[in-house]
């Protein structure tokens, strides 16, 4: 949580700095006209916020790909989710894994999930569609490689199962952006139809579409940090896009996944800081599509930090006209006052990784140069939570008609 001496808040500059908004009910009523545009950001209606249309019985859910870091965090969140007191997810390995000679348990794979003094363990079963269907699965989480998710989503939809996919397989609508994944479709026409209905799972931008989606494509971790920092400013039309935006983003090693590589080996990553995928990172397409900008208007460079988890993105941009800090605060506040998992730091305080690690928040802050035109945005989130599993649960909450912060605070 935040350092209380600095106080994270969504209040405008000059307002009281006591406390942190943690739910919709804590937030002030929005005044003035509501902007509606390509970002789909609007004030929730009474129908949106009504609990009368929410599910009273939790859906049956399954997690495929439980062995990775994101899968383990997803299991933890759902096992402690208040809407699932008597409904345990079905935990599945990956397709093709042999039937175990002895039971494989979640608590053996992720010992941190074991409960002291409790003998019960949760079995991990090899993936088969028969198992998924027999379990009565209504929502399937895919924490699987991109190629596997691209293959399985059509098969899930055919069986009437909704999907929240944590891979990059369904995030990108434009073929040119999706090329980075080199995906192959058994039925290209059917895949194109499903791609057109896949909703980019950023609740702060698309919460209304997520509520009724059959396919939710969970955003990338880097992309989430950058998009949440820039979307309010780009929508407000105050960014000089012709001058260009520079995103300098740094992530902990868990962002590269659980499988070890030469670049994530301790001897490489420890006591080191390195840039990678310059001019070619797979999350760049998400920035272009979700911010509605072109590739010559933004430069995104990721770096590998020698820490386990967390992302800090420092974003440099120029404004079209001289602006006061209070105006920037208002733009951010207006955009996020109904977003319980985005916290705004009061200027001059800036987000830090230590304040967001193991939380489901994205923290945003900014510094404006004395000339009123050079702006630096800083965004921080936990790549395994708000950048992956926490955001996936946030999307599930919306699909069920629950408060999107349920089980995440």
Image: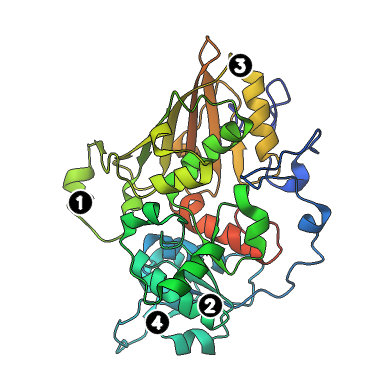
Task: Identify residue for label 2.
Answer: 157
Sequence-wise first label, 4 or 1:
4
Task: Identify residue for label 1.
Answer: 265
Residue placed furthest toward the top: 371
Mark nearest the camera among 2 and 1 is 2
**How far apart in space, not on screen, are marks 4 and 2 (Cα)?**
16 Å
Q: Residue at x 83, y 54 (%)?
A: 46
Mark 1 crowdedness (10 Å alpha carbons): few <14, some 14-19, many ≥20: few
Label of residue 323 in the image: 3
Indicate the secondary structure of the residue bearing disc 1: loop
Q: Which quarter of the image is occupied by the N terminus?
A: top right
Sequence-wise first label, 2 or 1:
2
Mark nearest the camera among 4 and 3 is 3
Mark 2 crowdedness (10 Å alpha carbons): few <14, some 14-19, many ≥20: some
**Res 174 → quadrant:** bottom left
Sequence-wise first label, 4 or 3:
4
Task: Identify residue for label 4.
Answer: 127
**How far apart in space, not on screen, are marks 1 and 3 (Cα)?**
45 Å
Q: Nearer the viewer, residue 173 or 279?
A: 173
Q: Is residue 121 above or below residue 9?
A: below
Sequence-wise first label, 2 or 3:
2
Q: Say whether residue 143 is left or right of residue 333.
A: left
């Amino acid at each position: 949580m935040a350092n209380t001496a600095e106080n994270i808040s969504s209040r405008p500059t000059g307002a009281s700095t006591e406390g942190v908004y943690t739910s919709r009910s804590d937030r002030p009523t929005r005044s003035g006209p509501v902007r509606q545009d390509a970002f789909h950001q609007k004030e929730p209606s009474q129908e949106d916020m009504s609990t009368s249309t929410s599910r009273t019985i939790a859906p049956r859910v399954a997690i495929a790909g439980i062995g990775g870091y994101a899968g383990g965090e997803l299991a933890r969140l759902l096992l402690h989710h208040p809407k699932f007191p008597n409904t345990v997810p079905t935990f599945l390995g990956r397709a093709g894994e042999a039937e175990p000679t002895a039971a494989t348990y979640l608590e053996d794979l992720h010992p941190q999930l074991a409960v002291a003094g409790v003998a019960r363990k949760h079995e991990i079963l090899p993936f088969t569609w028969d198992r998924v269907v027999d379990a009565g699965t209504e929502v399937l989480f895919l924490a699987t490689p991109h190629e596997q998710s691209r293959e399985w989503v059509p098969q899930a939809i055919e069986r009437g199962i909704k999907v929240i996919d944590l891979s990059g397989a369904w995030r990108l609508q434009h073929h040119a952006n999706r090329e980075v994944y080199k995906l192959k479709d058994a039925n290209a026409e059917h895949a194109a139809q499903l791609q057109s209905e896949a909703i980019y799972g950023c609740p702060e931008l698309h919460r209304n579409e997520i509520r009724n989606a059959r396919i939710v494509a969970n955003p990338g971790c880097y992309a989430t940090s950058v998009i949440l920092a820039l979307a309010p400013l780009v929508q407000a039309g105050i960014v000089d896009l012709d001058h260009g935006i520079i995103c300098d983003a740094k992530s902990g090693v868990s962002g590269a996944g659980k499988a070890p590589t030469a670049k994530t080996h301790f001897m490489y990553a420890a006591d080191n800081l390195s840039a990678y995928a310059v001019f070619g990172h797979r999350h760049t397409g998400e920035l272009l599509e979700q911010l509605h900008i072109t590739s010559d208007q933004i430069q995104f460079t990721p770096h590998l930090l020698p820490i386990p988890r967390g992302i800090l993105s420092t974003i440099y941009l120029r404004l079209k006209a001289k602006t006061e800090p209070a105006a920037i605060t208002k733009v951010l506040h207006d955009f996020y006052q109904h977003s319980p998992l985005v916290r705004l730091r009061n200027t001059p305080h800036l987000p830090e990784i230590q304040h967001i690690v193991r939380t489901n928040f994205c923290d945003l802050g900014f510094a404006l140069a004395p000339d009123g035109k050079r702006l630096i945005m800083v965004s921080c989130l936990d790549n395994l939570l708000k950048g992956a599993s926490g955001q996936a649960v946030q999307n599930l909450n919306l699909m069920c008609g629950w408060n999107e912060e349920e089980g995440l605070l």
